[in-house]
Image (spheres, grey):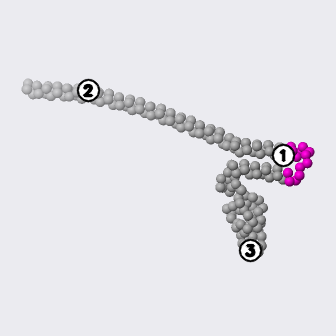
Amino acid sequence: MSSENREDLYSESNELNETSQDNGESNNESIDSKDQEIENLRKALAEANENLLRVKADADNFRKRIAKDFEEKLKYANQSLLMDFITFADNIDIALTHLRGGEDFSIDKIREGFELILKQFKDILSKHGMKEICCEIGDQFDPNKHEALMLDARDDFENNAITMVLQKGYTLNDRVVRPTKVKVNKK
């Protein structure tokens, strides 16, 4: 080999070494940056998992608090109604005490007392959304509000007319909770 050829080979070899060293440093830098990126992703994942657990715990606590509040409200939902019934019961006790007292009461006074007690009772029901279904003899039978227990065959009433009210019906906030029980004319 000639000296020129050797120098060319040597020079190419040095260039290759320098290039490979540059590539090695570049590879090391690339590996270091990827390791750093992986580490950052791991930290972000751990943080996201912690946030998820925190949100799940908050949601669970919220659900438990709502359930407890609901149970508490349900437990005392009838308090107002029951307080009204206590007053009603007190008035019945007073009436019975007067009757037991040996005083002579006329039947008119007793009837008047019962009418007042019944009015108070109906007022309590009305205050809490319960209303009597209006039903008169001669009204047309309505299966949404009435329950036919008996049939009649009278000529002085139209077909499907109510001939007798057997038991009053009631609605609670406009929903029928007990239909009026009636006798209906069928020709």
Q: Which residue is mark 3?
A: 187
Q: Quadrant of the C terminus?
A: bottom right
Read off the magenta span. Answer: 96-110
Q: Position of residue 79 (x, y in %)?
A: 70, 42
Q: Is residue 140 above or below residue 13?
A: below
Q: Position of residue 103 (x, y in %)?
A: 91, 46
Q: Nearer the viewer, residue 97 or 85?
A: 97
Q: Which residue is mark 2?
A: 25
On the rendered structure, is 4 left or right of 54? left
Query: Can you tell which of label 3 and label 2 is closer to the viewer?
Result: 3
Circle 2 residues within 10 Å: few <14, some 14–19, many ≥20 = few
Earlier in the chain: of badge 2 and badge 1, it is 2
On the rendered structure, is 84 left or right of 61? right
Q: Are marks 3 and 2 in contact (CB under 8 Å)?
A: no
Query: Can you tell which of label 2 and label 1 is closer to the viewer?
Result: 1
Q: Which residue is mark 1?
A: 95
Q: Is residue 117 above or below residue 34?
A: below
Query: Can you tell which of label 3 and label 1 is closer to the viewer?
Result: 1
The amino acid type, in three-letter code, at marker 1 is Ala
Total of numbered circles in the picture?
Answer: 3
* Mark 3 vs mark 1, CA separation in Å: 48 Å
Earlier in the chain: of badge 3 and badge 2, it is 2
Query: Which quadrant of the structure image shows residue 80?
Result: top right
